[in-house]
Image (tube, rainbow, N blue to C red):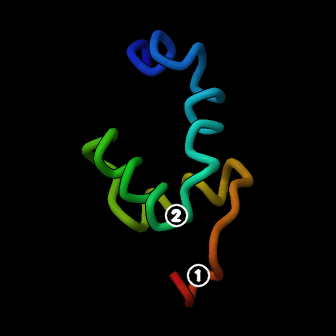
């Protein structure tokens, strides 16, 4: 988190830097950046922070 804050100014700014990516690219980026997060964890996180996510059955 400290590295993200140093690179982007805040975690929120980091999330905004992912806005140009589609859902699947965002999941890939989150999974790469945070080793313990898989596809489902990334979906739940994005859903919980009110980011755009596909319907559960379509992901």
Q: Position of residue 20 (x, y in %)?
A: 61, 51
* In this view, 39 is above or below 10: below
Q: Nearer the viewer, residue 57 or 23?
A: 23
Label 2 vs 1, first from the N-terminus:
2
Question: In percent of the image, x 55 and y 56: which residue is there?
Answer: 21
Report the number of discs.
2
Q: Which residue is mark 1?
A: 56
Residue projecting furthest to the bottom: 57
Q: Position of residue 25 (x, y in %)?
A: 44, 60
Residue projecting furthest to the front: 20
Q: Position of residue 6 (x, y in %)?
A: 46, 10
Q: Are marks 2 and 1 in contact (CB under 8 Å)?
A: yes
Residue projecting furthest to the left: 35
Q: Nearer the viewer, residue 57 or 19?
A: 19
Label 1 secondary element: helix
* In this view, 21 is above or below 53: above
Label 2 secondary element: helix
| The N terminus, quarter of image | top left
Tell whether 4 sits left or right of 34. right
Q: Which residue is mark 2?
A: 43
Q: Nearer the viewer, residue 40 or 6?
A: 6
Question: In percent of the image, x 33 and y 51: which residue is there?
Answer: 31
Which quarter of the picture shows residue 54? bottom right
Which quarter of the picture shows residue 34? top left
Q: Position of residue 15 (x, y in %)?
A: 59, 38
Question: In percent of the image, x 39 and y 49: which residue is there?
Answer: 29
Tell whether 14 sits left or right of 53. left
């Amino acid at each position: 988190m400290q590295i993200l804050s140093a690179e982007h100014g805040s975690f929120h700014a980091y999330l905004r830097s992912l806005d140009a990516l589609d859902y699947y690219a965002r999941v890939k980026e989150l999974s790469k950046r945070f080793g313990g997060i898989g596809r489902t964890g990334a979906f739940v996180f994005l859903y919980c922070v009110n980011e755009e996510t596909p319907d559960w059955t379509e992901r």
